[in-house]
Image: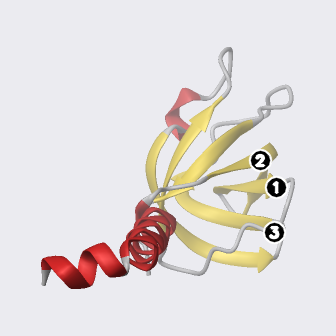
Amino acid sequence: MKEFFKKHALATFVIVVVISIVGLLLYVKRKRYFTDNFFDKGSVGFITEKPHGLKELDTIKITQDSGAKNSIYDGLADVTKVIDNYKFVINKGWAGSSPVNPGYFVKQNLF
């Protein structure tokens, strides 16, 4: 077995690197940014910069930029409605109008 690895050291190294990268892509949670929130039938929704990739029942963790007026939006939430690729609504009630509240969210369930 040692001879095999000596003979194929580069191939073995490449395989280990590829497996590591795939693992990171599957398990590293990526930040996705939103630019503001909006009212939707008593709940709060968010507008994203890029397509959000969410679906109903996804769990996300929201973090607003410092100085956000409605800190109740921060933390874990479930997506209750996907309006389009750039807008979604969560299971938290609307806390009132405020200045623009940007921030980011991270999807918690991987699949």
Q: In the figure, residue 86 lies in which quadrant?
A: bottom right
Question: x%, y% of residue 60?
Answer: 49, 58
Taking the spot 26% from the left edge, 77% from the top edge, the residue there is 5
Whole-Å distance between the Cαs marked 3 and 2? Answer: 10 Å
The quarter of the rendered structure image containing the N terminus is bottom left
Q: Mark 1 highlights which residue?
A: 47
The colour scheme is secondary structure
Taking the spot 56% from the left edge, 80% from the top edge, the residue there is 56
Q: Which of marks 3 and 2 is nearer the N terminus?
A: 2
Residue nearest the observer in this picture, 31 or 61: 31
Whole-Å distance between the Cαs marked 1 and 3? Answer: 10 Å
Q: Residue extending furthest left?
A: 1
Circle 3/circle 2 CB separation < 8 Å: no
Circle 1/circle 3 CB separation < 8 Å: no
The amino acid sitting under disc 2 is Phe
The amino acid sitting under disc 1 is Ile
